[in-house]
């Protein structure tokens, strides 16, 4: 494994650990959200949780393609409990912004000629941006 691949694999594994946590956080927030508009928010949080699971699957595939070992860890710093709609939205908006920044930095380390990996990260960034916009629109 090349030095460059190791750096990319390490970055992908860090993001994989975040995706694991995000899937858990969104699913839990969907279960506990209450208040006005909570049913609509619950449905969207469940959907985003599923998106995060798909992101993790894509990351595992790319890590394996590079000769790495996918992490099974969870980024505990990304597991933030909340019950109120305002707090849930604030936490998840902040996390989406963080994910977009982290994926954008990771993308800078990926050679564009690694087309599949490059496009995979671009697709995930696009999803995270969509999540951010939708969550911001849900704010009262």
Image: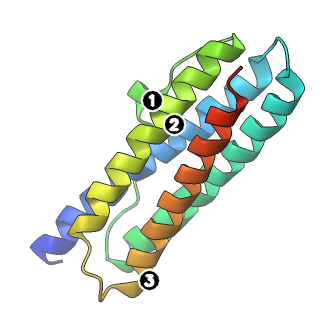
| Residue occupying image coordinates x 53% and y 51% | 129
Q: Quadrant of the N terminus?
A: bottom left
Residue occupied by mark 1: 78
> Which class describes the residues within 10 Å of circle 2: few (<14), some (14-19), or many (20+)?
many
> Counting other residues with Cα less than 10 Å from the Cα at mark 1, is it few (<14), some (14-19), or many (20 or more)?
some
Asked if marks 3 and 1 touch (Cβ < 8 Å), the reply is: no
- Residue 120 in the image, given as x and y percentages of width and height: 48, 72
- Dot 2 or dot 3, earlier in sequence: 2
Q: How far is the residue under mark 3 from the one under mark 1?
A: 27 Å
Q: Residues within 10 Å of mark 3 (few under 14, many from 20)?
A: few
Q: Secondary structure at mark 1?
A: helix
Using the numbered discs, state the Cα–Cα distance from disc 1 to disc 2 in whole angstroms: 6 Å
State the count of labels: 3
Assign the C terminus to one quadrant of the image.
top right
Secondary structure beneath dot 2 equals helix
Q: Is residue 120 above or below residue 49?
A: below
Residue 116: mark in rendering? 3
> Would you say the residues marked 1 and 2 are in contact, meaning their CB atoms lie under 8 Å apart?
yes
Q: Residue at x 44, y 39 (%)?
A: 97
- Ranked by sequence position, the earlier of labels 1 and 2 is 2
Q: Residue lying furthest right in this view?
A: 39
Vertical position of residue 116 compared to residue 81: above or below: below
User: In percent of the image, x 67 and y 24: which residue is there?
Assistant: 139
Q: Position of residue 45 (x, y in %)?
A: 73, 36
61 versus 81 height, above or below: below
Q: Which x, y percent locates residue 101?
A: 34, 47
Return the residue at label 2: 21
| In-front residue for pair 30/1 | 30
């Amino acid at each position: 494994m090349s030095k460059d691949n190791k750096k990319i694999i390490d970055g992908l594994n860090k993001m994989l650990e975040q995706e694991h946590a995000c899937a858990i956080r969104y699913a839990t927030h969907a279960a506990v959200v209450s208040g006005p508009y909570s049913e609509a928010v619950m449905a969207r949080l469940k959907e985003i949780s599923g998106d995060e699971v798909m992101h993790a699957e894509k990351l595992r595939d790319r890590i394996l393609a590079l000769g790495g070992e996918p992490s099974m860890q969870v980024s505990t710093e990304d597991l933030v409990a909340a019950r109120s709609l305002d707090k849930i939205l604030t936490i998840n908006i902040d996390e989406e912004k963080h994910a977009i920044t982290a994926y954008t930095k990771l993308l800078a380390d990926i050679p564009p000629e690694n087309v599949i990996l490059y496009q995979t990260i671009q697709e995930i960034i696009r999803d995270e941006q969509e999540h951010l916009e939708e969550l911001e629109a849900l704010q009262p």
